[in-house]
Amino acid sequence: MSTVESSPDQRAFVPVTLDLGDVSLRPWGRATEILGGAVAGVLAAAADPAIARWNPIRATDRAGAEAYLDRCESGWAGGAAAAFAVVDAADGTLLGNSSLRWVDRADGLAMIGYWVLPAARGRGLATRVTGAVTAWGVATAGARRIELAHAVGNDASCRVAERCGFPAEGTLRASHRYGDGAYHDEHLHARLATDPEPPVH
């Protein structure tokens, strides 16, 4: 994994590329190096039914995709959010996304999310990426507690959380409106900086 120099604000997410060997986590923005371009990658992800349901990007055209990428860049610029494009290191194909954002920056409380494109599912990629971004957020930005919330019906996300050492803490009732327009109950998981590393899967 790549490292970054300390920031004057220790709770700032500083742009960096994380190297996981076969995949590369690159900061999202209009210039992110992805086969076919960043805008096309965002549009392809937004059109996937599973992503549209559980992690809606709401980008139906080029302008919408560019606005999404601009928000990612703004998050990085302010140190408040870290959005990574997960890219195949060999050919530059977009595989997924992972994002970490401050919920309460002064208190070191952050939240993590992720999505994976259909061709990359079923190989443990979300688990590897979530683990890497979690470790990076703790080590470089001083995250004290990282929360992970997913709709109760999203079993795949529940498995990712558990494998990454985010134990379930409870159910949040009708807490978030998802891509289907309905409010769903969510499972809340969290990982503390002081928690032991989870077993390798």
Image: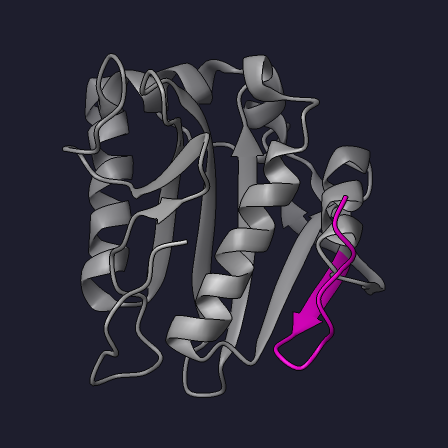
User: Magenta part of the protein: which range?
Assistant: 188-201
Residue most toward the left? Answer: 31
Residue drawn 70% across and 22% down?
122
What residue is rendered at 36% in x and 56% in y?
Answer: 82
Asked if residue 29 lies left or right of residue 113, the reply is left
Residue 196 lies in magenta, yes or no?
yes
In screen coordinates, is 43 left or right of 49? Answer: left
Query: In this rendering, does residue 34 appear at all?
Result: yes
Q: Residue at x 75, y 60 (%)?
A: 198
Across and down, in percent, residue 162 comes to 80, 52
* Residue in the picture at 53% in, 15% down: 48
Asked if 172 appears above or below 144 in the picture, the reply is above
* Image coords of residue 46 (percent x, y): 44, 22
Q: Is residue 41 above or below residue 56?
A: above
Q: Is residue 159 left or right of residue 104?
A: right
Q: Quadrant of residue 87?
A: top left
Residue 134 placed where, x, y %? Answer: 54, 61
Is residue 161 rendered magenta in the image? no
* Numbered-mark total: 0
Check the picture and name the quadrant holding the C terminus: top right
Residue 60 visible in the snapshot: no
Q: Nearer the viewer, residue 14 or 172?
A: 14
- Residue 170, quarter of the rendered image: bottom right
